[in-house]
Image (tube, rainbow, N blue to C red):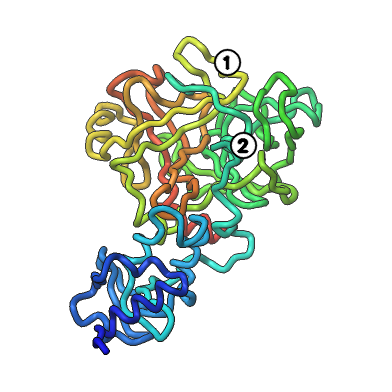
Amino acid sequence: MIKMNKILLSCLLICSIGYPVICRGNKIKFQNGGSKHKIKDGDNCYTEEGKEGTCMALHKCTEISEIVKSRGGMQTKGTADIVRKRICGFGVREARVCCLPDTTPKNPIIPTLDECGLTTIIKIVNGQNFRHGTHPWLVGVGYLQNQNKNSIKVECGGTLITKRHVLTAAHCFTNQKIPEITHVILGEHSLSEETEREPPIILKIADKLNPGYNESFHYRDIELLTLEEDVEFSNYIFPACLPFEQYVKNFNFSNNNMTIAGWGKTSFANREGTDRPMEAEVPLVPLEECKEVFQTFENVFIDETQICLGQNGKDTCSGDSGGPVIYYDRRNTVRYFVTGITAFGIEECGRPGFPGVYTYIPEYMDWILQNL
């Protein structure tokens, strides 16, 4: 009988029970060095990025299991490669993976990957209209018109992040020229016509909080809204995923555009906004380049808590204040994450050479989690 390499035998065995992740020809490339097959369950290990984890059976690793599940199973294109890169050894019937600590808080109100960032539908400036349900996390923030509980004047955008919470911009609540903002509308599409397949929901804002917004410098421009009651999720009302560090570290902002959306004005001359929301895909502008663009503005302060986006006349405008910046993580979780909040830009929005400035949500995750 021909003697087979122990690792190859393990590979063939695991392949036969449904783990194609470790079958790539007759060779297994270990990411932690040539002696990786000696790593035992519970030993320390390191990912390709140098992150320290624990070597454990695949089914015990919450982090990897969630990614596999969110992508539709091990057979989905690209999923096997993601898991293969984490293999740190083999058990009797299952591969071991280098599992990073699960840093997601165990607050039951925070949606899991099964409960966020999904849409059933597979312009801002130079943008385009999109179908109802494309951005089910898009929220209108405003006030009741003539005390009519079925009509709301939308002044800002927002992003649904849990069944009870919405993220928007703090500066939306400092405008003395409009009535006090008191309500949100969810599942809305057309602001003037009843075209929605399901009627939108209007809810009162029970509480609001910001981390110390500095209006003079447009700094810390983020507001967390608590709604009066829970929202029932549907195809048209659904939260975006929160950008926890374990997900953000795998995002590729340089090669992937982000999406901005809202009902805001689409040109400098159009101050009334659009009836239907619009979207545009915009690239990231390097922070140092953005700082240089705004360095002549005395009342602008830009640092790592912000990101800058925009190119070729695509940008958000004043009516989009508070609206979402969305990143689609097509490579790993296949979910939509809210990564930014529309903050400010020059008055002539969409002007070439002047990107929009957005609050960078990953920098505020600790504050958000403390206040959910």
Residue 25: % across, % down: 27, 66
> Residue at coordinates 49% horizontally, 70% vertically from top-left?
62
Along the viewing direction, whichever of 61 and 322 lies nearer the viewer: 61
178 over 205 or under it: above or below: above
Query: Mark 1 falls on what kind of element?
Result: loop
In which quadrant of the rendered view does residue 125 lie? top left
Q: Amino acid at mark 2?
A: Val
In which quadrant of the rendered view does residue 134 lie? top right
> Residue at coordinates 35% horizontally, 29% vertically from top-left?
310
Left or right: 227 in relation to 209 = right
Along the viewing direction, whichever of 283 and 372 lies nearer the viewer: 283
Quadrant of the image containing the C terminus:
bottom right
**Dot placed on the residue nearer the N-terminal end, 1 or 2:** 2
78 over 99 or under it: above or below: above
Checking the image for residue 139, the label placed there is: 2
Checking the image for residue 272, the label placed there is: 1
Disc 1 versus disc 2: nearer the observer: 2
* Other residues around mark 1 within 10 Å, as few (<14) / some (14–19) / many (≥20): some
* C-alpha separation, residue under disc 1 versus residue under disc 2: 18 Å
247 over 183 or under it: above or below: below
Residue 332: % across, % down: 41, 54
* Other residues around mark 2 within 10 Å, as few (<14) / some (14–19) / many (≥20): many
Quadrant of the image containing the N terminus:
bottom left
Left or right: 26 in relation to 41 = left
Q: Amino acid at mark 1?
A: Glu
> Residue at coordinates 36% horizontally, 50% vertically from top-left?
251
